[in-house]
Structure formats: C-alpha cells, structure tokens
C-alpha cells in the first residue's frame, strides 16, 4: 500500500563574494498528509560556470552524479534525505559553490529537485512543486569587455503530451563583428520529467553539426546533459543564424505544468588560443521551457 506525501523544494538566490565563493541554501519539505516512510533526495544541477566548492562544508552523504571540468557544462549532485520527514516539516540543505573565472556578468541559473527515491512506498500526490530554478549573483561585477563574436540562442516554446516526443527548434546567432573561426558549443540540460530519449532518437541537424549526450539517467527527476558542436563560419551578413532541432521526450507520470531546463552557447572555452572571444557571456545563457500536459 502506498503512502501519500506531497514533497516540495524552495530555493534562494546565491550570492558569491569577490573570491567567487558562496553557499546555496535549499529547503525541502513535505506538505503531507503523511510522513515519508522511504528515502528521498535533493538533486542539484549547478549553473554554468559554477562548481561545487570542495573546500567548504559538504552535506552528509552527498554524491556527485556528473562532473565536467569545462566551465560551460554543469555538474549534478545528489543529497539523501532519510525516512520520517513529517507532514508540514522542512529541512535545510547547504551546498558550497565556487564561481569560475570568466563567468558572465549576469551569472547563470541552475535547478534543484526534491523527490522520492525510485522504489519508495511513498506516493507523491503533486509533482508541480518538486523542481525549482535558482540563480547566482555577484557581490562584485567584472568590467565589461568587447569580443570578436557575440553568441546567443533562442528557442520555440512547445507543449508536450505524456510519453511523447517533440523536436524543439533552437536558433543560434552570432551578433558580433566577425564570423566564428573555430567550433562553438551549445550545452543543454533537460527540464523535470523530460529526457533526450531512450533509446536515443537522432536530432535533425544541418550538415557538419554534431549532437552528443554527455550524461543520461533513467530517473526523470535528474536532468540529462547534451552538447551540440557548431562548425566555424557562423556570423556575417549571409550566415548569421543556424537552427537545430533538439529531440525531447516527456516521461510518463510527470506534472501538468511548465518546466524549465537551461542552455548556454559559447565559443570553445577549452582552447586557450581560440581567436573567437566573447568576454561577457551574459546573453549567451538562459532557461528554456516546455509545458507538460499532465501525467
């Protein structure tokens, strides 16, 4: 027999100091009507250009699900919460963050999700409050600088039925003074109860563009991460936009509400001699959203 609960998460804006350090505070709770009898967990996707600060005080039992050293690829950590979270009770979880060098003046956002663990006897009655975005702000802003390129992306907002697939058009632009001379990269993490598909369905891509899933997870509360490689030559009067079709699949059992993932489009930051410079990446990143049409 299932045990009815109603879990939720609240997030706060994270302020980092002049050294880039800050503490993210997440509040998880249970609206009831019953205490949890099984395990639950908080999953945190870091913003782009943010790492977990391993020198800080880490939550007990926290594990890293995914980590990538590239600044434009997020990390995902998981913090366990044991049984017995009473109806009306909350618990605070703090995670130390470190903003990386070269981060945008307007720092990106991440996502926090609190759900029951797979196989738990707890039945969450309402999944619409289990996943929330959060943002990082600086106490000291860097001096803006000009670059050779100015990359950004937009997307088409779509509605998605349960256990259905769609192709989300993502439009990539270079509004800088010069075309790109090297590869550039769009990195995406999926919304709550949305995956890139399993088995993977190939995206519709223009010639020369590649799509790689960096991380996948069968748990729909954990985002998947993918990276699109764009060849040189974007920009100028005749080639200022490229559209790629990103395959997204809703997972059955999800909420009936708007859900958000995140994306960033930047030059190859792993190449220190890259002639494509885009110093203030504040317009390169933002969330992208879908409307899920129920379970």
Image: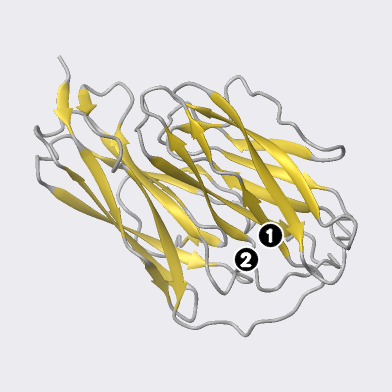
Task: Give the crowd class for mark 2: few <14, some 14-19, many >=20 residues within 10 Å.
Answer: some
Would residue 268 be seen by someone viewing this image from the given angle? no
Residue at 88% in and 63% down: 236
Up-down: is 163 above or below 134?
Answer: above
Between residues 100 and 5, which one lies in front from this camera angle? Answer: 5
Residue 268, by quadrant, is bottom right
Residue furthest to the top in view is: 1
Pointer 2 with pointer 1, Cβ within 8 A:
yes
Q: Earlier in the sequence, mark 2 or mark 1?
A: 1
Residue at 20% in and 28% down: 38
- In three-dimensional space, the C-alpha distance between marks 2 and 1, rounded to whole angstroms, equals 6 Å
Q: Secondary structure at mark 1?
A: strand
Q: Is residue 178 left or right of residue 193?
A: right
Residue at 43% in and 38% down: 192
Q: Is residue 5 left or right of residue 146?
A: left
Would residue 6 be seen by someone viewing this image from the given angle? yes
Q: Tell me, for residue 176, which label it has, or none.
A: none
Coordinates of residue 220 in the picture (x, y in percent) = 43, 31
Q: Secondary structure at mark 2?
A: loop
Residue at 17% in and 19% down: 2
Coordinates of residue 198 in the picture (x, y in percent) = 57, 22
List the residue tagged with mark 1.
152
Coordinates of residue 71 in the picture (x, y in percent) = 62, 59
Q: Quadrant of the N terminus?
A: top left
Residue 148, by quadrant, is bottom right
List the residue tagged with mark 2.
283
Up-down: is 144 above or below 36?
Answer: below
Q: Quadrant of the C terminus?
A: top left
Between residues 142 and 91, which one lies in front from this camera angle? Answer: 142
């Amino acid at each position: 027999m299932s045990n009815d609960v109603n879990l939720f998460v609240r997030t706060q804006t994270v302020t980092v100091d002049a050294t880039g350090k800050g503490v993210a505070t997440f509040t998880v709770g249970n609206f009831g009507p019953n205490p949890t009898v099984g395990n639950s967990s908080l999953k945190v996707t870091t913003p782009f250009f943010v790492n977990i600060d391993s020198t800080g005080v880490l939550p007990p039992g926290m594990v890293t699900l995914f980590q990538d050293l590239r600044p434009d690829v997020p990390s995902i950590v998981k913090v366990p919460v044991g049984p017995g979270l009473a109806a009306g009770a909350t618990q605070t979880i703090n995670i130390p963050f470190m903003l990386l060098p070269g981060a945008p003046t307007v720092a990106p956002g991440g996502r926090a999700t609190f759900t029951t663990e797979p196989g738990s006897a707890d039945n969450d009655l309402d999944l619409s409050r289990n996943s929330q975005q959060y943002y990082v702000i600086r106490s000291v802003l860097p001096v803006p600088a000009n670059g050779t390129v100015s990359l950004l992306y937009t997307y088409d907002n779509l509605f998605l039925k349960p256990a259905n697939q769609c192709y989300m058009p993502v439009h990539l632009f270079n509004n800088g003074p010069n075309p790109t001379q090297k590869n550039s990269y769009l990195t995406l993490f999926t919304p709550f109860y949305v995956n890139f598909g399993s088995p993977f369905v190939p995206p519709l891509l223009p010639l020369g563009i590649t799509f790689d899933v960096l991380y996948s997870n069968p748990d729909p509360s954990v985002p998947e991460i993918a990276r699109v490689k764009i060849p040189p030559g974007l920009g100028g009067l005749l080639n200022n936009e490229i559209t790629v079709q990103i395959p997204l699949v809703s997972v059955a059992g999800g909420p009936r509400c708007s859900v958000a993932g995140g994306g960033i489009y930047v030059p190859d930051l792993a190449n220190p001699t890259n002639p494509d410079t885009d110093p203030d990446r504040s317009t390169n990143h933002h969330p992208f959203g879908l409307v899920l049409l129920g379970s």
